[in-house]
Image (cartoon, grey):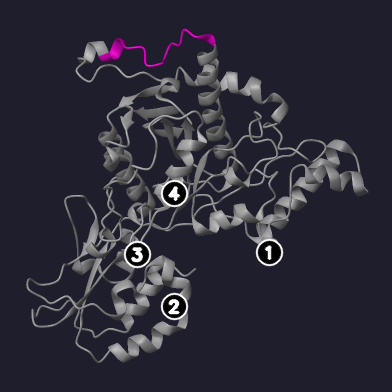
Amino acid sequence: MPSNVVYLRALLAGLPSTLPYSSATQSAYKFQEFSLNDNDIQDLGLAGVTSRSARETPQLRTRPHGMHRRRGLFDQAFHPSFAGELGDQWAPALARDKDVNHALILQIYPSEYMSTGHTSDCVYDVPMALDSHLLRTRGLEPDDASLRMRGHLHETANYVVGPMPVQNFIDDFTPPPPLSLAKRKRILSSRAAFTGVPSSCATAAEIFEPMIAALNRSTKHKSRASGLMFENVSARSEHPHALGFMKPHICCYTPKGAESVHQSPISSRAALGYAELFIEVKPDVSLDYFVDPPLAADAEHSASHDFLAKHEDKRTRLRVDRSFGQHIAYVTEIFARQQRVCLYSVSMAGSFARLCRWDRSGLIITRSFEFRVHLELLCEFLARFAYGSSSARGHDTTVNKASSKEEETFRDAITKCVQQQLCVDGDELAKAIREHYSPGPRGGL
């Protein structure tokens, strides 16, 4: 897909040379869909008309006071999601509009604010080493799932930071993206968002099924999380309730990610290879793995508070440990199947929820909040997450798919290495290579 710079260059080339306009009598189109770095701005010759706001966001001058904003052709001109559809239509469109004395108004934001969805700037469902039978992912074998889960619980207990105030978490990790008025109007109101979700149930399904309906609810022009969809993937397993085979109750996908999951066999783990975030549900608040200090507690009391819940009933403790251990297992596997800097998840216990941010140093988790009462918190988090870029959602965008040439180089190197180590040829060599390499689609990994 051509870059924003290419499209913006084409746009500027098709406009009159009198940028920027100063007359308040001229009409103006407004753009809020570009993310350019300083080098791009300099390269485009726009440095003289750019400025930085208090948030250090590069932007072109705003339109003169009183200038009429006219809706029209360019309102969604170069939004990344339209780029593939527009193609060659732009040359004649620009030519037709060239004679109209329109002002060009641009606001350019840092790339981390711009939502790119499922695009080439991040890598999903990366290849992983297989066992000697080429049937299971090495390191994530189901037979060892129980042992891994206990290890995850033991290790994670020492690397948890919380409870963090929910609004602080949202503001610090998902800052509000600069949205146009039109985009803000496309966000569905949080009013009565989760009234159909029960506060407590006998099974998790009684909560996550209406929750999925609430999250996916949309009207003709509005949605809860624009460009994302929430699905129940827990049933897409050969053994839905067995450790090592289980999948999250709710996974969030881009449309292309969901399509890839639907096309994969039920035995695959692609559901975790394409997840943007996931939500794990426990049917009752008593099964929460954490316990918050009182809201009125002072700093000393909060610092000495034992954040991990202590359950006297052995059966309850086992259920709680298994549930959160499985939550950690999903995080571990997503990190293994995607190139990530961090990952977001939501832990629900009855009608209470906690927002989680995972990275390779541990977990930051919020206070528990009742999402049926403080429904604006969950809605705000998901709306910001939806409009965030791939990097804002936690993807490591410095990693790209290998080119055909790079794949060929890797294949030759791994073939030579395996042959030297095992001293095998023919079918035995091919089988050994398949443990470490599988051909990428259309010749690329």
Residue at x 27%, y 37% (from the top left corner): 374
Classify 10 Å Cα crowding around label 2: few (below 14), some (14-19), many (20 and above).
Answer: few
Q: Where residue 279 sits: x, y (%)?
A: 46, 38
Would residue 422 be counted in the magenta stretch? no
Compared to 113, does 307 lie above or below?
A: above
Taking 93 as reference, is 309 above or below it?
Answer: above
Q: Which mark is residue 21?
A: none
Q: Could you tell which of marks 2 and 3 lies nearer the N-terminus?
A: 3
Which amino acid type is marked by label 4? Ala
Judge left or right: residue 183 versus residue 413.
Answer: left
**Picture coordinates of residue 403, whole percent (x, y):** 63, 60
Q: Where residue 370 sits in the image (x, y, percent)?
A: 31, 32
Residue 86: quarter of image: bottom left
Dot 4: what SS?
Answer: helix
Residue under pointer 2: 86
Nearest to the eye among marks 1 and 4: give it: 4
Vertical relation: 410 (above or below) 310: below
Chief secondary structure of the magenta portion? loop
Residue at disc 1, secondary structure: helix
Which residues are drawn in magenta? 302-314
Classify mark 2: helix, strand or loop: helix
- The crowding category of the residue bearing disc 4, from other C-alpha atoms within 10 Å (few below 14, some 14 to 19, many at least 20), is some
Q: Do the CB atoms of the residues marked 2 and 3 lie less than 8 Å apart?
A: no
